Image (cartoon, coloured by chain):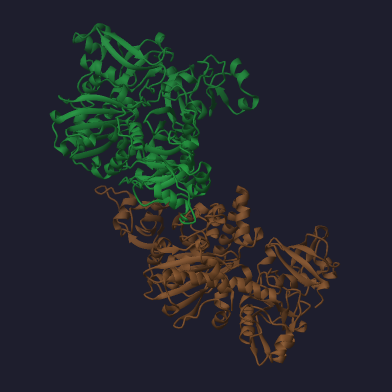
Chain colours: A green, B brown
Amino acid sequence: MNTDNEVRVVFRPAGRSARVPAGTLVTEAAAQVGVAIEQVCGGKGTCGKCKVKALSNGLGPLTDSERKHLSEQEIADGFRLACQATILQDASIEVGWASATAGVSILVEGLLEPVALDPLVKKTAVQVPRATLEDQVADYEALRRVLPTDHGAPRAMVNALRELPGALRAADGLLTAVHSAGLLLSVEPGDTRNQLYGFACDIGTTTVVGYLLDLNTGQRLAVASTLNPQTRFGDDVVSRIDVAQRDAAGLEALRSVIVEAINDLIGQTAKKARIKREQVYALSIVGNTCMHHLFLGLSPAALGRSPYVPVIASPLQLNANEVGLQAHPAAQLFVLPNIAGFVGADTVGVLLATRLMQSDEVRLAIDIGTNGEMVLGSRSRMLACSTAAGPAFEGAQLAYGMRAADGAVDHVDVVDGDVILHSIGRGKLRGICGSGVVDAIAALRRLEIIDPTGRLLPREEVESCGGNKKLAERLIPHAQGGAVVLAPAERTAIGGPLLLTQRDIRQIQLAKGAIRAGIEILMKELAVEPEQVVEVCLAGAFGNYIRPASALTIGLMPRFPRAAITPVGNAAGSGAQMALLSRQAWQEAARLWTEVEYIELSLRQDFQQVFMDAIMM
Amino acid sequence: MNTDNEVRVVFRPAGRSARVPAGTLVTEAAAQVGVAIEQVCGGKGTCGKCKVKALSNGLGPLTDSERKHLSEQEIADGFRLACQATILQDASIEVGWASATAGVSILVEGLLEPVALDPLVKKTAVQVPRATLEDQVADYEALRRVLPTDHGAPRAMVNALRELPGALRAADGLLTAVHSAGLLLSVEPGDTRNQLYGFACDIGTTTVVGYLLDLNTGQRLAVASTLNPQTRFGDDVVSRIDVAQRDAAGLEALRSVIVEAINDLIGQTAKKARIKREQVYALSIVGNTCMHHLFLGLSPAALGRSPYVPVIASPLQLNANEVGLQAHPAAQLFVLPNIAGFVGADTVGVLLATRLMQSDEVRLAIDIGTNGEMVLGSRSRMLACSTAAGPAFEGAQLAYGMRAADGAVDHVDVVDGDVILHSIGRGKLRGICGSGVVDAIAALRRLEIIDPTGRLLPREEVESCGGNKKLAERLIPHAQGGAVVLAPAERTAIGGPLLLTQRDIRQIQLAKGAIRAGIEILMKELAVEPEQVVEVCLAGAFGNYIRPASALTIGLMPRFPRAAITPVGNAAGSGAQMALLSRQAWQEAARLWTEVEYIELSLRQDFQQVFMDAIMM
């Protein structure tokens, strides 16, 4: 590959950049760095959906298809079709929100432990006796007489009182009270107990997933997901903190787009389940501490600087409409607690789903994203920490890295010197995602083509040591310290071969070293030996797709001789659902934030040494 | 007086009508029936403020002053100046809200028992220690550590959390928490404890009074009052129930005008006290059950028909902005409880102010308006009832009755056959208000010119029995069964003499009979003899202005040989203020609605007989 022919393209507002051969299509470059662009027609130039805006010169001439699908004004404004426009020189391209949603596979499934159904909002049907002159009981007090007392002192929302006289007289005193911990939310005439719905939401930095639940059965009726629209303002937590602390408008913009996105998910799931959003009476939210804060309109500024403190850790019960959510006007929102500035309500969700706090033996839960959060412990003591793994496991900052989207290599095997690739979708290869990179590095490490320090041996060295000849041929010089050819140019859609570079290996070493060091510190602090750990729960998309064997080979985690390694999927989302379905789970969540001990790694004198050791493979 | 020359005028929307001599000014007729019309220039026709709208023909020709102050469009639309236009034939006149507010004296003062200051909303200044890497406590939890725990589980309003990081860092951790029973309302940077304000409001059927309080000192900083703008929709409770149950728009119209009026009083009192309305953190409301319901937007329909039940009796704590009140966005509203459909939160306020529930001996509290509510009892047992006294005591439905406004005779004495009148303001007489009528009837009863059945003796009978000759001359024939001339035409502004008619006496007999019968039934039920009652507290405007001796003479209440008769002024408003200043008072109020036993008079077999006896004088 002639690097003289490479050009640099930056995608805004995500801020991701890629070096691609001159002449690469915008869609190809975007896929390579995990920027998704909607292509309904599959890149044929017939649907006109993949509009992007050129923020600089550097793109090739307009094609006929673009002239057909873009208005004169759009052309004047710099709009292009991403599947048509080629990148000839360094360029900067803005990808609008509307076209950035498709093609990325969002992990929605998660381990859903069975819970004893005891939802946070309940319906009770009662026959309220008529008041008489002898017993002139007020409507509300008459209802309270026959309504089983729930937890807490009885209170009523004004709207419920406004509905009460009508509901009471509409069906001869038969009505259904909707209540939550002693708070009367609403009254409905007749017996409507069979309609009771809740909505659980996991706000990720990158993706947002919403689950519509039947609170009577615990059944999931519908699920919907979307990219987090805040990515417009910055890809990662740090850049969003920057926007939010710049001024009140920045925070408000971040708040309103995520609230709008969640409202959209409520609407989508309600539509799929053929109910009205006004029938949703209970909602739960998990997210990392920054997402939690931005959603509630709380400044995340203090999260971004030492000592990294949240505004609030404790759980919250709010009126959903107080924070702009559109469901029943009296719907209650349950916000799971945070543990620390970088161990948020999403980790609490993971803990609920993995039942760590109920375990007699030591378990480890890891949620790997841009940050890796991990909790180690059992019923008697739980320790948590967070490490800045960086986005390498999400495919970012790798030469050919991309998200787990169409065209991404997600698994790599080396058999008899042949490199066998597995990719997402049926098209040509566009890049490699986190699980694929880890597989590739693990395979090369096992063949000693990568040494324990992470050095990629040059072709000559492999050949001279009698290494596999076919593999040795794949080792090529590269500006990033050498590279391995994973796939030749003819198998890719990126105008050249798919490579894994020495720099990529270093990125992965830093990322896995951070995770590994966190685990080692937690084990030291808890005085736990590897033999004592009985299960490792891997949460999140990366944890779900990664092969345990590869993770162990690269040393992402220590070898736990007795431990089962369990991918638990979107466990944060599972935890949010469990809280909604079970008051006991919600109460456990409310305890978790005080019970889990947070270990601040930056305070550990031993962290640097542990980290250096952890980088080795 | 030649009744052939009388014409009938109806004032809309109040629905009050009067028979007046042809040629009477609209302002005079209005004053006579208690319809207040603003007259800045005192009726000289120079200010143009007294605009009314003729809904029918029947008024005299336009004067020069009217041509000057009314636009052509206004003249075309039927507008007139009330101080200029004369009534020549039967007429119907609409009095706008804006011109109906002035001139009526609204009772705002009330007995304010000293309370131990413990306001429902408190401020606490705290120095919150900085978080460190060793102690990464979240802002809210850091605040909770140093904030003395209040009642109940700690909760926070979202707005308080939004303010928290800024407030915490603005003054190096010194901040003032505003809280109510464990609910954090707001945080202010620095020490702002010296600014803590509350607003108490008494919503009467006719008048609304608001009190701005310094919750640190218990001092009243400002007071403001207004006519209840709902009078536009109907003068009394029953007509407003009609409007409210007609459709949702009717209820909403009644709700929104009273909320608007209260917001206006908050603004007026805040301005007088030179604070901002956003500094008001606590509000309390009393009112009769119907006013309570209309203010909250609860249907009063069931109050208007047997078995006369409210939507809710229990006390409510709400976010003030939830019901549209404009104060601090997190301000808490405390709505005092109702006892029954016709014994509302205003009576609870009266009980708080009179301390009936703390009395070892039996006391009687009476609040006389269109309905008379009374509570008899002591610490050990309290009974309440309500009787439909009608509006006679407020001056309505009497031939020359009017509210206690400028020009109203409010006290009458007869000394040596001379009738000595006391009136409000310095102008000519316009009518007679409740306390004046009671005085007049009492004086005539003592002189046996009215007999025990309430019959007004004709002149001949008085003279033949050797009664006072000067008084006898005042007895004249009248279509309403005879009349007494209280003042000759030259002393009045109504174009004729001021009369008390036989029909007026009957109206007062019915009203006082209802009150008296209520008292008698309560005494029977509680098995209390008159000697056991140690105090009679008279609440409300009428109770405040009436002379105890006159009330006893006409038999409004039994003779209680040991009882002090104490006018307690606007005791409902006093109770609202006490609740705001003292959590103990609020908690007493919360108990009162269950402890006071309501006696439904319509269920009493003995009521008719007691009532017939009670009519006698």
In percent of the image, x 48 and y 58: which residue is there? B328
> Does residue B502 lie above or below A299 as drawn?
below
Residue A307 percent coordinates (x, y): 30, 47
- Relative to A363, is B577 on the left or the right? right
Q: For residue A483, which quarter of the picture?
A: top left
Tally the marks: 0
Quadrant in the rendering for residue B218 = bottom left
Q: Nearer the viewer, residue B325 or A349?
A: B325
Q: Position of residue A525 (x, y in %)?
A: 17, 39
Q: What residue is shown at x 27% (from left), y 50% (from top)? A: B132
Tell me: B227 left or right of A243.
Answer: right
Q: Residue at x 63, y 61 (%)?
A: B229
Quadrant assignment for the C terminus of chain A? top left
User: Which residue is located at x 50 percent, y 74 percent?
Assistant: B110
Which quadrant is home to the N terminus of chain A? Answer: top left
> Along the horizontal axis of the image, is A458 left or right of A302?
left
